[in-house]
Image (tube, rainbow, N blue to C red):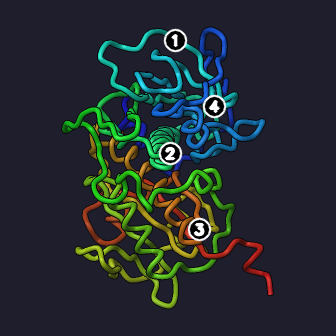
Amino acid sequence: MDLAAALGHARSTRRPDPDTPAGPAVPAWPGWPLPIPEARPAELDLQALLRLSLAASDGSGRLRPAPSAGALHPVDTELVVGASCSLPPGRYGYDPLRHRVHRLGRQPEGTPPGMTAELSVAARRTASHYGHRAWPLLLLDTGHAAAALFLAARALGAGEPELRLDGGAERPLAVVHLPPSGLVHRTDASVYRLDGPLHSQPSASAHTPEELLARRSTPPPLPGTPDAYALRAVLTNAAHAGGSDLRWCAAVGPPRPGLMELAPDGTALRRYAAGEARPTLAAWAAGQTWIADAGAVLLAHGCPADADTPHIRRTHLRAGFAVHLAHVTARRHGLTARPVGSWQQADLGAALGATPGQDWIVHGLALGTLHAEEENTP
């Protein structure tokens, strides 16, 4: 498909057509659904890992650890299982609604120890509601799913995860390799690895299984301005995980409204632009008026209008990945948070006086300090 044209349509002001059927929520994997065995010592616990990252926890299948635009969950997962896992080696299709797997065949020759998750999308699910706006959301959702697997592996003390978010292929869109504890498979230019404390194992910064199961997108509104310490932590994690193609800032309100970004040394926030941006962001984000009153809005921006297909895939995958990590960081600091993925006419660079078409908003995360019911509590 022509992804550049699809992104251009998604960024336009044209409204989606009426909803169409979303189709099956899970692929029709062949064979019988198989339970995932309990892990033995030194094995990668796939039952717990998938429960913390991709499994649905409600009967409808909408409620899952990884957020999704419209709760439509278009990401499908094939597992390539090597040695030292709680499943026998082979290729499997994962059913997140039943938390079961379907054996699809043998693992490829040379499969490393641990599990490799190959993430692809069923575009129809998201397009059923968002129409021509679907493709950026599909890529962002895939990045969120990759981040959910990454965080689950860290919470369980697995080896250092390796992520392929380079945008080089349409299927799978992203690949996450999770080795058993203490093992690393390979490193090359196409493998995305986080440097610093985000991947150290074990680590006090790793989120607990309880934190991962409790993460949810907060329903709007999201009032209350985060303090500078929390906002810096959220920006730091997003910038650290987002790669070199994206820039990050946060729109804040009174008493000094404007856009804030990290100082070059990362130790403080500095003003990137002055003025109240949140009402404009609300208009750009599919007219979601509540954004104008959010405590702050984290923004990933970049991906120019002339970007090629790998660049579009890469920036959106990494934006989804980074916003997911920023979301759980926000929750750890006591903030409310909600990802915002649909943006139209959101040319941030042009709005700030730069060359049009070069610096578009790719993803966002609305932040607050209070739930709506708390705001009105005496």
Element under label 1?
A: strand
Q: Residues within 10 Å of mark 1 (few under 14, many from 20)?
A: some
Which residue is label 4 attached to?
Answer: 96
**Label 3: which secondary element:** helix
Q: CA distance from mark 1 to mark 3?
A: 44 Å
Circle 3 sits on which residue?
Answer: 291
Question: Which residue is label 2 attached to?
Answer: 156
**Residue mark closest to the camera, 1 vs 3:** 1
Specify the quadrant that holds the C terminus. Answer: bottom right
Q: Is residue 90 above or below residue 61?
A: above
Q: CA distance from mark 1 to mark 4?
A: 16 Å
Between marks 4 and 3, how big is the CA–CA gap?
31 Å
Q: Earlier in the sequence, mark 4 or mark 3?
A: 4
Residue drawn 33% across and 80% down?
268
The answer to which of 319 and 362 lies nearer the viewer is 319
Instruction: Tell me, yes or no, whether the two marked residues, 4 and 3, touch with CB atoms within 8 Å.
Output: no
From the viewer's side, name the closer residue of 39 and 107.
39
Q: Compare marks 2 and 4 and give the one earlier in the sequence.
A: 4
The residue carrying mark 1 is 104
In the displayed orientation, state which residue is furthest to the bottom. 255
The location of residue 17, given as percent across then percent down, is 63, 38
Q: Give the Cα distance between marks 3 and 2.
A: 35 Å
